[in-house]
Amino acid sequence: MSKNIDLNWHEKIAKDCFNKTWELLEKKDRTHEEDNEMIHTVHTSRYHWGIMVANKLGTPVNLQRGEWQIARVHTVLKRKEPALYHANICLEITKEHNIRDFDLAFAYEAIARASALAGKLEDYKSYLNLAKEAGEKIKIKEDRVYFFEELNGGNWFVKK
């Protein structure tokens, strides 16, 4: 019984931290302290999803989305190395588990955006094209529209 209670707690923390990270990402004029909080919440969420997956109560998609969110946070904060590192892990999980559709498009977007930040222009162009191609194949129209809104928004650190 205590294992289920612990796992329920891990799931709650994973979700709460994921949502708090989104709240902070969307906040205009974050303080330095909030930037640090965002780094902590995003890594905490991913850690707790890892526990859920290890116990067969989460899926690889939880890990993939966690890595995507970590890459996004570090990209927004202009932290090149961790942004690229986590974007690549996101894509590795995506490929390893044959994750498609919406999540595949976002995996490519993460590497494209992190590559642009790092000044890796060839990688940026290549992954941006892959993101667009994958985005066009997203089956649910609302998800496809959302993806392209995200793809066309935010700072790309290069002239498109």
Image (tube, rainbow, N blue to C red):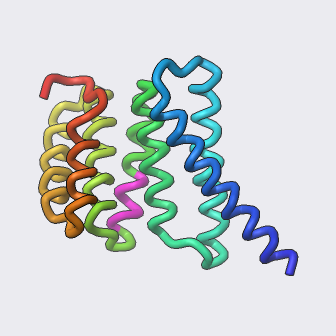
> What residue is at 25 percent from the left and 59 percent from the top?
142
Residue 41 sits above or below residue 116 on the image: below
In the rendered image, the quadrant that contains the N terminus is bottom right
Does 106 sit left or right of 78 as displayed? left
Name the main secondary structure of what is drawn in magenta: helix
- Report the magenta residues as a range: 89-95
Q: Residue furthest front?
A: 142
Which quarter of the picture shows residue 93?
A: bottom left
> What residue is at 57 percent from the left and 26 percent from the top?
35
Does 144 sit left or right of 60 as displayed? left
Does 143 sit left or right of 11 as displayed? left
Q: Does the magenta stretch include residue 156?
A: no
> What residue is at 14 percent from the left and 39 percent from the top?
125
- Name the foreground residue: 56 vs 153: 153
Q: Is residue 90 magenta?
A: yes
Residue 58: x and y in percent read 57, 72
Q: Which residue lies furthest to the right in this view?
A: 2
Count of all numbered marks drawn on residues in the image: 0
Q: Which residue lies furthest to the bottom in this view?
A: 1
Residue 39: x and y in percent read 58, 35
Residue 55: x and y in percent read 66, 76
In the rendered image, the quadrant that contains the C terminus is top left
Residue 59 sits above or below residue 130 on the image: below
> What residue is at 53 percent from the left and 38 percent from the top?
23
Residue 149: x and y in percent read 24, 43
Which quarter of the picture shows residue 101?
A: bottom left
Residue 33 sits above or below residue 15 on the image: above
Which quarter of the picture shows residue 134?
A: bottom left
